[in-house]
Amino acid sequence: MRKAFVQTLIRLARQDDRIILLTGDLGFMALEPFADEFPKRFFNVGVAEQNMLGLASGLAKDGYIPYVYSIAPFCVLRPLEFIRNGPIYHRLPVRIVGIGAGFDYGNNGLTHYGIDDIGSLRCQPGIHIISPCDYQQAETAFLRTWDIPEPVYYRLSKDDTTIVQGLDGRFVLGGAHVLRPPAQVGILALGTMSSDALKISDLLEQQQLSCGVVAVASVSPPPVEDLTEFMCKTGTIFTLENHYITGGLGSLAAEIIAEKKLDCRLVRCGVEALPNGRTGNTESLHIKSGIDPHSMVKRILQELKSAT
Amino acid sequence: MCAIYGTLLRASGPKDSLRDYFVLSKGHAALALYASLFLKGWLTRNQLNSYCDENSLLGVHPEHELSGVEWSTGSLGQGLPVASGLALASRLKNNDRKVYALLSDAECNEGSVWEAAMFAGHHKLSNLTVIVDWNGQQALGKTSTILNQLNLVERWAAFGWDAVEVDGHDLAALCSSAAKIGTKPKVLLAKTIFGKGVSFMENQIKWHYLPLSELDYHAAMEELGGGV
């Protein structure tokens, strides 16, 4: 989604000179087109993410729309208190662009994983959290949200090519998108996990089990109505996320089910254990966490069996 | 605060769109800010007297919802990065706005202060002026025994700033040092005495915390020659 981000930002920056891009010394082979076209509106602030968020806050207070870019934990967890006391508390249009949703940086280890970014921000009122499902939707999300007054966190994947079938680049802030209609079983998928959710649904279909799928990109504001409508027509809900099962989409679904008194069962599938230091690519880390399509099919069938 | 609000800050009012900005990075000195805003005519006496009352905007730390407060602070090390962003914005807009920030010496324990100092030094944000309240004390004791603030002047200079040591109680010296025009961001390391002018308070750590009794208040005001 880096290409979509940079290309869309360039388009926006051509029409609005309030847009500034700051990076914490990351974005090689990604941010150069923006830096080349807008050298005076591009700042590599160095490896100093707290200052980057402070600078962005000051720029936004004086009327700019600053985008700050880094790997997800570096621009969310490291400067979290700056985000809270700065753009959130002062209600300023700072855009935080975190690359590396979930296990994108597989071989780089826990320090680089974006598996607790949503949980860290979701408890804060006043910041939008968007985890796009594919690059087309990312583009729409950027175009829909670039000039809203509140801060936004964009949780981007390194994947520049995968397209979620049936999504067609649609994005609604506070909405979710039903890709397969509700059935006995349904999956709520976070961001890029949506394409895996479709694979799981296909595999279950081969075993004569219909499985609904909802793609969730807008985590905050939460798509309460869309999820309620889907979940109230589903027997067992599985949330699927490249994030710890606490604080992310699983927790959001649990809150909605409890508060709306929905008559469905919830199984939260995501990262449950602290990574053990063994390296691996994204796919193998999904397998370890049991969130790859084959593990998920097994788990869904098992859960259904144990429930009957 | 006297130097900033009495002399340095150019602003016809708290909403003046061309005003200079002041960020009180050491937010725990909010009382001094409220007094300054009152003397400036930007706060009413009623507002001033509402300090820490239920539902008042005048709390222990400054809140931006209060007209005249540019930035909510309280967590140390966050004001200078924001002030640097404000100074950068003015540079981009090519206007002559000046940005001031007041830090404490113990606040310089925070790494983020030096992140911002590096940035402002590198980008030569000459429209940014910092005053460090160098009183040698922090929450649990003297900085010399907790984290020694050795060579503060040299440290700031090494980060690309025009750094000068001044007597923080010498208003004229503060103002003239701040007014000097240079090509780098400027920091005044203002040597101060904690509780200056009140004999029983000077350099006494407990007054970082304790409220004044009625008796203490009268004694202090008498020593300051302010009457009651």
Image: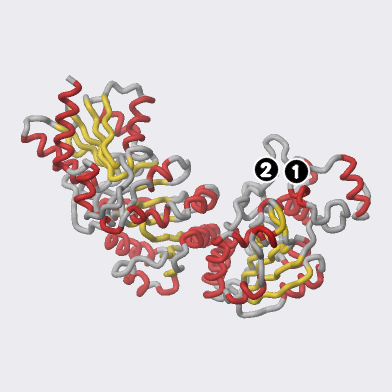
For the residues bearing labels 2 and 1, Cβ distance under 8 angstroms:
yes
Give the residue at x 19% y 28%: A303
> Which residue is drawn at the image coordinates 71% and 66% (left, top)?
B10
Could you tell me which secondary element the residue under label 2 belongs to? Answer: loop
Please state if A19 lies on the left or on the right of B123 as rendered. Answer: left
Amino acid identity at mark 1: Gln
> First in sequence: mark 2 or mark 1?
1
Which residue position holds label 2? B57
- The residues bearing labels 2 and 1 have C-alpha atoms spaced at a distance of 8 Å
Picture coordinates of residue A106, whole percent (x, y): 26, 55
The answer to whether any part of residue A143 appears in the image is: no
In the picture, which quadrant includes the N terminus of chain A?
bottom left
- Disc 1 crowd rating (10 Å Cα; few below 14, some 14-19, many 20+) is some
- Name the amino acid, label 2: Leu
Chain hosting mark 2: B
Q: Mark 1 = which residue?
A: B47
| A198 up-or-down from B67: above or below | above
- Residue A186 point in image, percent of width and height: 21, 32
Q: Quadrant of the C terminus of chain A?
A: top left
Q: Looking at this view, name the residue that lies furthest to the front.
A: B145
Residue A32 appears anywhere in the view: yes
The numbered disc on residue A220 is: none
Left-right relation of B138 to A225:
right
Q: Give x and y (percent) for residue B37.
A: 74, 54
Instruction: Residue lying at the far top in this picture: please name it.
Output: A308
